[in-house]
Image (spheres, helix red, strand yellow):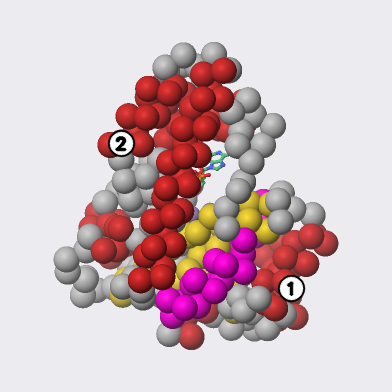
Amino acid sequence: MIDLHTHTYYSDGSLSPVELIDMAEQAGIKQLAISDHDSIDGLLSLELLPEKLRVIPSVEISTNYGKQGLHILGLNIDTNNQALQSFLKQQQKNRKQRALQIANKLVDAGVEHALDDVSFLVDSQPMVCRTHIAQLLLEQGYVKKFSDAFKKYLAKGGKAHIKDDWFAIEDVISIIKSAGGQAVIAHPMRYGMGANKLKSLIEDFKALGGDGIEICYPNIHPGHKNLLATWAKTFKLCGSQGSDFHNPDKSWVKLGKFAPLPDDVEPVWTRW
Ligand code: AMP
Ligand code: MN
Ligand code: MN
Ligand code: MN
Protein backbone atom coordinates (compact mmCIF):
# COMPACT_ATOMS: atom_id res chain seq x y z
CA MET A 1 0.00 0.00 0.00
CA ILE A 2 1.81 3.02 -1.33
CA ASP A 3 0.13 6.41 -1.84
CA LEU A 4 2.37 9.08 -3.34
CA HIS A 5 0.02 12.06 -3.68
CA THR A 6 -1.92 13.62 -0.76
CA HIS A 7 -2.80 17.05 0.67
CA THR A 8 -3.20 18.61 4.11
CA TYR A 9 -4.55 21.96 5.27
CA TYR A 10 -1.15 23.48 4.52
CA SER A 11 -2.59 23.73 0.99
CA ASP A 12 -6.16 22.76 0.05
CA GLY A 13 -6.65 19.57 2.07
CA SER A 14 -8.78 19.53 5.20
CA LEU A 15 -6.67 17.41 7.58
CA SER A 16 -3.55 18.27 9.55
CA PRO A 17 -0.43 16.25 8.64
CA VAL A 18 -0.83 14.23 11.87
CA GLU A 19 -4.51 13.49 11.14
CA LEU A 20 -3.60 12.46 7.59
CA ILE A 21 -0.85 10.13 8.85
CA ASP A 22 -3.25 8.55 11.39
CA MET A 23 -5.81 7.95 8.69
CA ALA A 24 -3.18 6.46 6.37
CA GLU A 25 -1.94 4.13 9.13
CA GLN A 26 -5.50 2.92 9.67
CA ALA A 27 -5.88 2.34 5.94
CA GLY A 28 -2.74 0.15 5.98
CA ILE A 29 -0.59 2.54 3.93
CA LYS A 30 3.14 1.76 4.24
CA GLN A 31 4.54 4.70 2.24
CA LEU A 32 2.74 8.05 2.22
CA ALA A 33 3.87 11.07 0.21
CA ILE A 34 2.53 14.27 1.74
CA SER A 35 2.55 16.55 -1.31
CA ASP A 36 0.90 19.90 -0.67
CA HIS A 37 0.60 22.48 -3.44
CA ASP A 38 3.78 24.59 -3.46
CA SER A 39 4.46 24.01 0.24
CA ILE A 40 6.51 21.77 2.51
CA ASP A 41 5.35 23.56 5.66
CA GLY A 42 3.17 20.60 6.70
CA LEU A 43 6.22 18.33 6.55
CA LEU A 44 8.33 20.84 8.48
CA SER A 45 5.61 20.98 11.16
CA LEU A 46 5.99 17.27 11.99
CA GLU A 47 7.84 16.82 15.26
CA LEU A 48 7.83 13.04 15.26
CA LEU A 49 7.80 10.69 12.30
CA PRO A 50 5.40 7.75 12.56
CA GLU A 51 6.64 4.20 13.13
CA LYS A 52 4.08 2.23 11.15
CA LEU A 53 4.52 4.00 7.85
CA ARG A 54 7.21 5.86 5.99
CA VAL A 55 6.47 9.48 5.15
CA ILE A 56 7.91 10.41 1.75
CA PRO A 57 8.52 14.18 1.92
CA SER A 58 7.05 15.64 -1.25
CA VAL A 59 5.51 18.70 -2.90
CA GLU A 60 3.16 19.32 -5.85
CA ILE A 61 4.53 22.29 -7.77
CA SER A 62 2.45 24.48 -10.08
CA THR A 63 4.33 25.09 -13.32
CA ASN A 64 3.89 26.05 -16.99
CA TYR A 65 4.58 24.03 -20.14
CA GLY A 66 4.34 26.88 -22.58
CA LYS A 67 0.92 28.37 -21.85
CA GLN A 68 -0.35 25.14 -20.31
CA GLY A 69 -0.52 25.04 -16.50
CA LEU A 70 0.72 21.72 -15.07
CA HIS A 71 1.42 20.07 -11.73
CA ILE A 72 4.76 18.37 -11.14
CA LEU A 73 5.31 16.25 -8.04
CA GLY A 74 8.67 16.41 -6.35
CA LEU A 75 8.84 13.09 -4.49
CA ASN A 76 11.29 12.16 -1.73
CA ILE A 77 12.83 15.62 -1.54
CA ASP A 78 15.17 17.03 1.09
CA THR A 79 12.93 19.51 2.90
CA ASN A 80 15.99 21.28 4.33
CA ASN A 81 17.25 22.23 0.85
CA GLN A 82 17.67 26.02 0.79
CA ALA A 83 17.09 26.48 -2.94
CA LEU A 84 13.83 24.53 -2.71
CA GLN A 85 12.71 26.48 0.35
CA SER A 86 13.30 29.86 -1.26
CA PHE A 87 11.68 28.73 -4.53
CA LEU A 88 8.55 27.69 -2.61
CA LYS A 89 8.49 31.03 -0.76
CA GLN A 90 8.38 32.73 -4.17
CA GLN A 91 5.58 30.40 -5.34
CA GLN A 92 3.58 31.27 -2.22
CA LYS A 93 4.08 34.99 -2.88
CA ASN A 94 2.84 34.48 -6.43
CA ARG A 95 -0.14 32.53 -5.13
CA LYS A 96 -1.11 35.38 -2.80
CA GLN A 97 -0.95 37.85 -5.67
CA ARG A 98 -2.97 35.52 -7.86
CA ALA A 99 -5.65 35.07 -5.17
CA LEU A 100 -6.06 38.86 -4.99
CA GLN A 101 -6.19 39.14 -8.81
CA ILE A 102 -8.94 36.52 -8.83
CA ALA A 103 -10.76 38.45 -6.09
CA ASN A 104 -10.63 41.67 -8.13
CA LYS A 105 -12.10 39.89 -11.12
CA LEU A 106 -14.80 38.39 -8.91
CA VAL A 107 -15.74 41.88 -7.71
CA ASP A 108 -16.04 42.96 -11.35
CA ALA A 109 -18.26 39.94 -11.93
CA GLY A 110 -20.59 41.02 -9.11
CA VAL A 111 -19.24 39.04 -6.15
CA GLU A 112 -19.46 42.03 -3.87
CA HIS A 113 -17.30 41.12 -0.88
CA ALA A 114 -14.75 38.96 -2.70
CA LEU A 115 -11.78 41.25 -2.13
CA ASP A 116 -12.35 41.50 1.65
CA ASP A 117 -13.08 37.80 1.98
CA VAL A 118 -10.10 36.64 -0.06
CA SER A 119 -7.80 39.18 1.66
CA PHE A 120 -8.91 37.72 4.97
CA LEU A 121 -8.03 34.21 3.78
CA VAL A 122 -4.68 35.37 2.42
CA ASP A 123 -3.83 36.87 5.83
CA SER A 124 -5.15 34.03 7.98
CA GLN A 125 -4.44 30.75 6.17
CA PRO A 126 -1.19 28.96 5.31
CA MET A 127 -2.15 29.18 1.62
CA VAL A 128 -5.06 30.23 -0.59
CA CYS A 129 -5.91 27.89 -3.47
CA ARG A 130 -8.78 28.22 -5.91
CA THR A 131 -10.47 25.48 -3.86
CA HIS A 132 -10.91 27.90 -0.95
CA ILE A 133 -12.34 30.59 -3.22
CA ALA A 134 -14.73 28.02 -4.73
CA GLN A 135 -15.87 27.16 -1.20
CA LEU A 136 -16.56 30.86 -0.49
CA LEU A 137 -18.63 31.17 -3.68
CA LEU A 138 -20.63 28.09 -2.68
CA GLU A 139 -21.22 29.27 0.91
CA GLN A 140 -22.33 32.72 -0.26
CA GLY A 141 -24.80 31.25 -2.73
CA TYR A 142 -23.11 32.48 -5.92
CA VAL A 143 -23.17 28.86 -7.14
CA LYS A 144 -25.25 25.84 -6.19
CA LYS A 145 -22.50 23.25 -6.62
CA PHE A 146 -18.79 23.39 -5.80
CA SER A 147 -17.81 22.37 -9.33
CA ASP A 148 -19.92 25.23 -10.73
CA ALA A 149 -17.61 27.70 -8.97
CA PHE A 150 -14.84 26.46 -11.27
CA LYS A 151 -17.03 26.35 -14.35
CA LYS A 152 -18.60 29.76 -13.88
CA TYR A 153 -15.72 31.70 -12.31
CA LEU A 154 -12.36 30.02 -11.69
CA ALA A 155 -11.53 27.64 -14.53
CA LYS A 156 -10.53 28.57 -18.08
CA GLY A 157 -13.47 30.39 -19.65
CA GLY A 158 -14.75 31.51 -16.22
CA LYS A 159 -15.35 35.16 -15.32
CA ALA A 160 -12.52 35.34 -12.80
CA HIS A 161 -10.03 33.09 -14.53
CA ILE A 162 -6.36 34.10 -14.32
CA LYS A 163 -4.02 32.63 -16.90
CA ASP A 164 -1.41 30.22 -15.56
CA ASP A 165 1.86 32.10 -15.16
CA TRP A 166 4.15 29.82 -13.17
CA PHE A 167 7.84 28.99 -13.60
CA ALA A 168 8.64 26.78 -16.60
CA ILE A 169 8.94 23.01 -16.20
CA GLU A 170 12.72 23.07 -16.74
CA ASP A 171 13.14 25.32 -13.68
CA VAL A 172 10.85 23.14 -11.59
CA ILE A 173 12.57 19.88 -12.62
CA SER A 174 15.96 21.34 -11.78
CA ILE A 175 14.81 22.57 -8.34
CA ILE A 176 13.39 19.11 -7.54
CA LYS A 177 16.58 17.37 -8.71
CA SER A 178 18.78 19.76 -6.74
CA ALA A 179 16.74 18.86 -3.63
CA GLY A 180 17.47 15.17 -4.30
CA GLY A 181 13.91 14.32 -5.38
CA GLN A 182 12.18 12.57 -8.25
CA ALA A 183 10.20 14.80 -10.63
CA VAL A 184 6.90 13.23 -11.69
CA ILE A 185 4.11 14.67 -13.89
CA ALA A 186 0.94 14.61 -11.77
CA HIS A 187 -2.39 13.31 -13.16
CA PRO A 188 -1.43 13.71 -16.87
CA MET A 189 -4.98 13.09 -18.11
CA ARG A 190 -6.52 15.95 -16.13
CA TYR A 191 -5.17 18.81 -18.24
CA GLY A 192 -7.47 18.34 -21.20
CA MET A 193 -4.45 18.02 -23.51
CA GLY A 194 -4.74 16.11 -26.77
CA ALA A 195 -2.75 12.86 -27.11
CA ASN A 196 -0.08 14.39 -29.39
CA LYS A 197 0.60 17.34 -27.12
CA LEU A 198 0.66 15.10 -24.06
CA LYS A 199 3.14 12.75 -25.71
CA SER A 200 5.37 15.73 -26.62
CA LEU A 201 5.18 16.96 -23.04
CA ILE A 202 6.27 13.55 -21.74
CA GLU A 203 9.12 13.39 -24.25
CA ASP A 204 10.28 16.93 -23.37
CA PHE A 205 9.92 16.18 -19.66
CA LYS A 206 12.28 13.20 -20.00
CA ALA A 207 14.78 15.25 -22.04
CA LEU A 208 14.77 17.91 -19.30
CA GLY A 209 15.68 15.36 -16.62
CA GLY A 210 12.21 14.32 -15.40
CA ASP A 211 11.91 10.94 -13.69
CA GLY A 212 8.37 9.68 -14.01
CA ILE A 213 4.68 10.07 -14.64
CA GLU A 214 1.74 9.41 -12.38
CA ILE A 215 -0.07 6.52 -14.04
CA CYS A 216 -2.47 5.22 -11.41
CA TYR A 217 -4.95 7.51 -9.69
CA PRO A 218 -8.67 7.36 -8.90
CA ASN A 219 -11.06 7.46 -11.85
CA ILE A 220 -8.42 7.28 -14.58
CA HIS A 221 -9.85 5.51 -17.64
CA PRO A 222 -8.15 2.06 -18.01
CA GLY A 223 -7.31 2.87 -21.64
CA HIS A 224 -5.58 6.08 -20.56
CA LYS A 225 -3.69 4.21 -17.86
CA ASN A 226 -2.39 1.74 -20.46
CA LEU A 227 -1.41 4.58 -22.80
CA LEU A 228 0.57 6.29 -20.04
CA ALA A 229 2.24 2.97 -19.16
CA THR A 230 3.28 2.58 -22.81
CA TRP A 231 4.74 6.10 -22.91
CA ALA A 232 6.56 5.50 -19.60
CA LYS A 233 8.30 2.50 -21.19
CA THR A 234 8.94 4.30 -24.52
CA PHE A 235 10.63 7.26 -22.83
CA LYS A 236 12.25 5.25 -20.00
CA LEU A 237 10.32 6.99 -17.25
CA CYS A 238 9.17 5.51 -13.93
CA GLY A 239 5.54 5.13 -12.97
CA SER A 240 3.95 6.61 -9.88
CA GLN A 241 0.60 6.19 -8.13
CA GLY A 242 -1.42 8.30 -5.73
CA SER A 243 -4.93 9.17 -4.61
CA ASP A 244 -4.61 13.00 -4.64
CA PHE A 245 -6.51 12.77 -1.37
CA HIS A 246 -7.75 16.17 -0.09
CA ASN A 247 -10.66 15.56 2.21
CA PRO A 248 -12.44 12.60 3.90
CA ASP A 249 -15.84 14.00 2.77
CA LYS A 250 -14.99 13.24 -0.85
CA SER A 251 -16.03 9.61 -0.46
CA TRP A 252 -14.98 8.59 -3.96
CA VAL A 253 -11.30 9.36 -3.25
CA LYS A 254 -9.79 7.09 -0.61
CA LEU A 255 -6.19 6.82 0.56
CA GLY A 256 -4.39 4.06 -1.33
CA LYS A 257 -7.42 3.27 -3.55
CA PHE A 258 -6.54 3.11 -7.25
CA ALA A 259 -5.61 0.42 -9.78
CA PRO A 260 -2.15 -1.14 -9.32
CA LEU A 261 0.81 -0.01 -11.41
CA PRO A 262 1.29 -2.32 -14.44
CA ASP A 263 4.02 -4.95 -13.76
CA ASP A 264 6.25 -3.90 -16.64
CA VAL A 265 6.57 -0.27 -15.50
CA GLU A 266 9.43 0.61 -13.12
CA PRO A 267 7.88 1.97 -9.90
CA VAL A 268 9.31 5.32 -8.86
CA TRP A 269 9.81 4.07 -5.29
CA THR A 270 12.60 1.72 -6.44
CA ARG A 271 14.63 4.96 -6.71
CA TRP A 272 14.74 5.49 -2.94
P1 AMP B 1 -4.90 26.07 -7.53
O1 AMP B 1 -3.68 25.22 -7.29
O2 AMP B 1 -5.03 27.20 -6.56
O3 AMP B 1 -5.03 26.48 -8.96
O4 AMP B 1 -6.12 25.14 -7.22
C1 AMP B 1 -6.19 23.95 -7.92
C2 AMP B 1 -6.96 22.94 -7.08
O5 AMP B 1 -8.35 23.17 -7.25
C3 AMP B 1 -6.73 21.53 -7.59
O6 AMP B 1 -5.63 20.94 -6.96
C4 AMP B 1 -7.98 20.84 -7.20
O7 AMP B 1 -7.91 20.46 -5.86
C5 AMP B 1 -9.03 21.94 -7.35
N1 AMP B 1 -9.73 21.96 -8.67
C6 AMP B 1 -9.23 22.33 -9.84
N2 AMP B 1 -10.17 22.27 -10.82
C7 AMP B 1 -11.29 21.83 -10.23
C8 AMP B 1 -12.61 21.57 -10.68
N3 AMP B 1 -12.97 21.73 -11.95
N4 AMP B 1 -13.51 21.13 -9.78
C9 AMP B 1 -13.16 20.96 -8.48
N5 AMP B 1 -11.94 21.20 -7.99
C10 AMP B 1 -11.01 21.63 -8.85
MN1 MN C 1 -5.74 20.62 -4.74
MN1 MN D 1 -2.83 18.54 -9.00
MN1 MN E 1 -2.83 17.16 -5.81
Callout 1 secondary element: helix
**Mark closest to the chain's N terminus, 2 or 1:** 2
Q: Nearest the camera: 178 or 41?
A: 178
Residue drawn at 47 percent across, 39 percent down: 97
Q: Nearer the viewer, residue 217 or 135?
A: 135
Quadrant housing residue 156: top right
Marks 2/1: CA–CA distance? 40 Å
Residue 28 quadrant: bottom left
Question: At which x and y percent is residue 138?
Answer: 46, 24
Horizontal arrangement in the rendering, residue 206 relative to residue 122 (left or right): right
Q: Is residue 1 visible?
A: no
The residue that label 2 is drawn on is: 123
Magenta residue check for 189: yes
Q: How many marks?
A: 2
Measuring 42% from the left and 35% from the top, which residue is drawn there? 132
Badge 2: few (under 14), some or many (20 or more) residues near its Cα, within 10 Å? Answer: few
Residue at the image position 33 percent from the left and 50 percent from the top: 10
Q: Which residues are magenta?
A: 168-191
Residue 203, disc: 1
Marks 2, 1: nearer the viewer: 2
Q: Secondary structure at mark 2?
A: helix
